Image: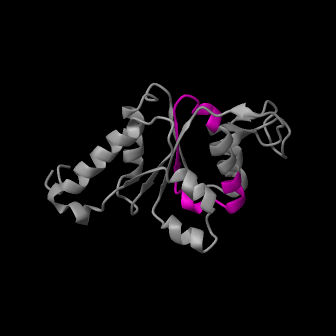
Amino acid sequence: GLSPPICDVQLRIDQVSHAPDTTVLVTGQSGTGKELVARCVHERSSRCHGPFVAINCAALTEALLEAELFGYEPGAFTGAAKDGKDGLFAVASGGTLFLDEIGEMELTLQAKLLRVLQERTFRRVGGVQDIPADVRIIASTNRDLRTMVQASKFREDLFYRLNVMTVTVPTLSERSADIPL
């Protein structure tokens, strides 16, 4: 698009792309293109040669999401693979991990994510060894996380760690001049 709201988004994408280790929170209604913005941030950053890995936090149960994010050791739980499994923090090493619908994440898992953001390390489920996390986190939500913080449904400390740089994606009705394009 060429409308002023989309030009503002493009400018903000360029700004956040120049800080490749800074977390980014992409906000906007469903269907506005939050994942597209996240991919643009990744592709314009110095992490563009690393992987872009996306996961929908609303699509998995807490236990499955934890195993997907952090991986697990052999025998960590019933049905765990014999060799264990790398999680998405390991898979995205050197690149970007996109956490779509972060507002749906359970509070206990939010605490584990906060630790990764603070310490830049993680542990596989059932593991005891810290593993370096060389990833940029981009999270998205269509929810008002500030309201969720006030209602004790989202961790305030995690909100401030995620909300370092923000990109707000306008709805199509806010940029109707782009419809013909």
Query: Does residue 9 lie above or below 45 as drawn?
Result: below
Asked whether 111 or 172 is in front, the reply is 111
Percent position (x, y) of residue 4? Answer: 19, 55
Percent position (x, y) of residue 6? Answer: 25, 52
Going 82% across and 32% down the picture, which residue do you hit? 82
Q: Is residue 152 visible?
A: yes
Q: Residue furthest top?
A: 49
Asked whether 31 or 82 is in front, the reply is 31
Going 61% across and 55% down the picture, which residue do you hit? 158
Q: What scheme was used to colour the molecule?
A: one colour
Percent position (x, y) of residue 133? Answer: 64, 34
Query: Does residue 1 lie above or below 156 as drawn?
Result: above
**Number of marks in the image?**
0
Going 24% across and 56% down the picture, which residue do you hit? 5
Image-based side of 109 in relation to 167, left or right: right
Q: Is residue 59 visible?
A: no
Asked whether 118 or 169 is in front, the reply is 118
What's the magenta region?
Answer: 89-111
Asked whether 22 or 40 is in front, the reply is 22
In the image, residue 14 lies in the stretch drawn in magenta: no
Image-based side of 55 in relation to 60, left or right: left
In the image, residue 106 lies in the stretch drawn in magenta: yes
Query: Does residue 34 lie above or below 146 as drawn?
Result: above
Going 52% across and 57% down the picture, which residue do you hit? 101
Image-based side of 175 in relation to 77, left or right: left
Query: Does residue 132 lie above or below 98 as drawn?
Result: above
Percent position (x, y) of residue 165? Answer: 44, 49
